[in-house]
Image (tube, grey):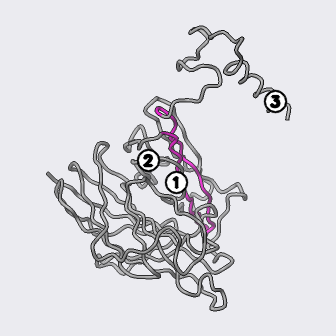
Amino acid sequence: MKARLTVGLVLGLLLGSPLAAPAPVAAQGPEGRWPLQPRSSVGRYVAPFLEGWYDNGDGTFTYSLGYLNLNEHVVELPHGEANFIEPSQFDGMQPTTFHVGKHRGVFAVTVPASMADTDIWWTLTNPNGEVTRVPARHIWTAYQLDYRARPHGAFPPEISFDDGNDATGQGITGLVSQRTLSASVGERVLVEMDVEDVSINDPNDSRVNQGTQLHVTWAKYQGPGRGEVDFERHEDTIELDVSEGQGGGGANQPERPSPGDEVVPIMDEGTTRVWATFSMPGEYVLLGQVDNFRRPDSSSGNQCCWTNGYVRVNVTE
């Protein structure tokens, strides 16, 4: 209570008192800000986060990693000196495009049993020169995650690609399509992913026994710094109500990578399709995050339940 009163008194003296004279320019800080003035919405931090770790039961460990972008715009940090993971054998899967806000579990790193006690460091150098880094380690039990179903049976959705590979992906680790798509600048390319909700439904629970509405959120994940990707709903996609959910009943809202990215809803299972258009040539990776956050026991906050799908696209002039 004393701290609040003190802050309130200082604010009153600085901002509200008719007797307070304007502070001289010399009183401003190194950023040209007045005391207690909020920082600018630009030139702020992008920071990596360890979201948690999984014990795989075979001596290996998987780390869930995400980030926080405090700017009000997308920040691009290419792989290299500005964005790298050590040891270098784990480098390369992290994003280069950092969307506004907090984004949990956008990729995972799995370490072999022989390196179980090795710290995995993700380092970012911001455009303003500030360095942020985080270690991935499994010594903090508070960060331990599990693969068990949530209280009402929610599991991360299962995904696959029609790429000649029978592999399926689930959870933070997800799946990378073995097929690289090709496109030209300004040309729409069709991106497809098969999704299925594999949660356990209780027929006596009205919140989940009518099926679950899945959401697939597409965003640029890696690519040229000035390259923009526009997503457009495919005409075969059935439009469902993304605001109230359907068949689930959960009130959780998926975290959107950015306001302009396409969110494709689908019931229970099927093929999700979206058009992607690229503004400049280069090698891109698109991230499709599939969630069942409409279930009552699923949300990003408890690291359940979504699955990451990655699609490579080679764009030429």
Q: Is residue 177 left or right of residue 169?
A: left
Alpha-carbon distance for marks 2 and 3? Answer: 38 Å
Residue 188, image x, y percentages: 21, 62
| Vertical relation: 280 (above or below) 15 | below
User: Which mark is drawn over residue 5?
Assistant: 3
Element marked by disc 1: strand
The answer to which of marks 3 and 1 sits earlier in the sequence is 3
Q: Which residue is under mark 2? A: 98
The answer to which of marks 2 and 3 sits earlier in the sequence is 3
Alpha-carbon distance for marks 3 and 1? Answer: 35 Å
Q: Which residue is under mark 1? A: 103
- Identified by mark 3, the residue type is Leu
Residue pictured at 62% horizontal, 91% vertical: 203
Disc 1 crowd rating (10 Å Cα; few below 14, some 14-19, many 20+) is: many
Residue pictured at 38% horizontal, 44% vertical: 79
- Identified by mark 1, the residue type is His
Query: Looking at the rendering, in which quadrant would you find the N terminus?
Result: top right
| Magenta span | 42-71
